[in-house]
Amino acid sequence: MEYPSKSIEEAVNELSGLPGIGRKTALRLALHILKQSEAQAERLGSSIIELRKRVQFCKRCHNFTDHELCKICTNPRRETRLICVVEDARDVMALENTHQFNGLYHVLGGLINPLAGIGPSMLHIEPLAERVRNEKIEEVIFAFSANIEGDTTAFYISKKLAPTGVRISSIARGIPVGLDLEYTDEVTLARSLINRTRLASPGE
Amino acid sequence: MEYPSKSIEEAVNELSGLPGIGRKTALRLALHILKQSEAQAERLGSSIIELRKRVQFCKRCHNFTDHELCKICTNPRRETRLICVVEDARDVMALENTHQFNGLYHVLGGLINPLAGIGPSMLHIEPLAERVRNEKIEEVIFAFSANIEGDTTAFYISKKLAPTGVRISSIARGIPVGLDLEYTDEVTLARSLINRTRLASPGE
């Protein structure tokens, strides 16, 4: 495809580097930007530049932040004795959207994955152990994906934290809300049976 | 949805203003940009700003260009006696990709559409008439969408150009290549019958 001008070609090249955006969509976006005011294009462009320039990782929990410490770590109303450990900062957003957790987070920056060459030393596991030792943490909650990397990482960290005596838990594995039992795979079903939760019985 | 930082929120707001990009996709794009190098984000952002700043309309044919005149108008190897008239600059790209036309273009900037309040004076029709009078044009080809606005515009311009005596034609309406006859709507089929093209017969 030949583009009518160098600037259009460059914008299409750059935009089509984004995930899920092919050259056709990139051209559509470029033509949309051309229809907007110069101020609007300026705002879009600089929001992208500023995004990468400003966003850093929280010194304490490695969540995204524009400052040294993140919004959650600096919020005085959060429960500081609870730490939820997650794979990456995206997971913090997902958990925050549930409005069910009021503790702090710790972002590992990945999960242990020997096949991909990711060992424990490449993740923020040591800083987590330090936080548990120094911050009067009562419970560490693992919120990992339900796969082998998640299980390996949970196993490794719980071994490492064992000497501190901190309580360790993991988010429940079970049937997703809204899913029919017959469509649930057997591994999930087995885990949901093992981790069954007790309902109040008439005798109690 | 709450975002971990102001810069992420702003980038999501701006990105989700693009066509076909919702807030979820915008967040995915923002997180992708965060994973890239600062130089890459800078390149993407400034390509958008430069795009809007540099691209203008060709003084002669109103196609997109970074300069005063577009690539096609300044190309000495184009056939200057042929003008293809199109609705907008996107159509120029589509026609160029066919590699079947070597003449010049004239972008109207829209089609006559009384219902939407677009009259002939709002389009670049007068400059087209001037070009036909001054540039030794032999043929004007209409390449409009096959709808009522396209037909109205073609009718209006051909009336306007009649005194110049220039040859006027329109791209063929007919069955799209690859489409089965039985699935073609009757209007298209009727037009394709009226505009039938003669094949060589054994007697010739």
Image (tube, coloured by chain):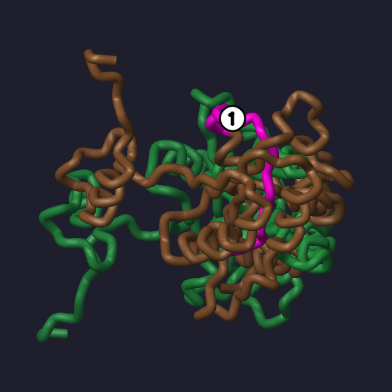
Chain colours: A green, B brown
The majority secondary structure of the magenta stretch comes to loop
Left or right placement of residue B95 versus residue B163 in this view: left
The picture quadrant where one finds residue A56 is bottom right
The question of residue B107 being in magenta is answered with yes
Residue lying at 81% horizontally and 48% vertically, measured from the top left: B134
Q: Chain of mark 1?
A: A
Residue furthest out toward the right: B68
Residue lying at 15% horizontally and 53% vertically, measured from the top left: A183
Question: Residue A180 placed where, x, y %?
Answer: 16, 61
Question: Residue A199 placed where, x, y %?
Answer: 20, 76
Residue lying at 79% horizontally and 53% vertically, measured from the top left: B57
Is any atom of residue A166 visible in this view? no
User: Looking at the image, which is closer to me, B180 or A185?
Assistant: B180
User: Looking at the image, which is closer to me, A103 or A56?
Assistant: A56
Residue under circle 1?
A: A118
Left or right placement of residue B37 versus residue B25 in this view: right
Q: Amino acid at mark 1?
A: Ile
Q: Residues within 10 Å of mark 1 (few under 14, many from 20)?
A: few
Question: Residue A46 placed where, x, y %?
Answer: 82, 59
Screen quadrant of the C terminus of chain A: bottom left
* Magenta residues, start to end: B97-111
Q: Please say if A37 is above or below A61.
A: below
User: Looking at the image, which is closer to me, A46 or B140?
Assistant: B140
Question: Residue A164 placed where, x, y %?
Answer: 60, 52
Left or right placement of residue A140 versus residue B189 in this view: right
The question of residue A19 being in magenta is answered with no
Considering the numbered disc 1 on the image, is that residue within a helix, a strand or a loop?
Answer: loop
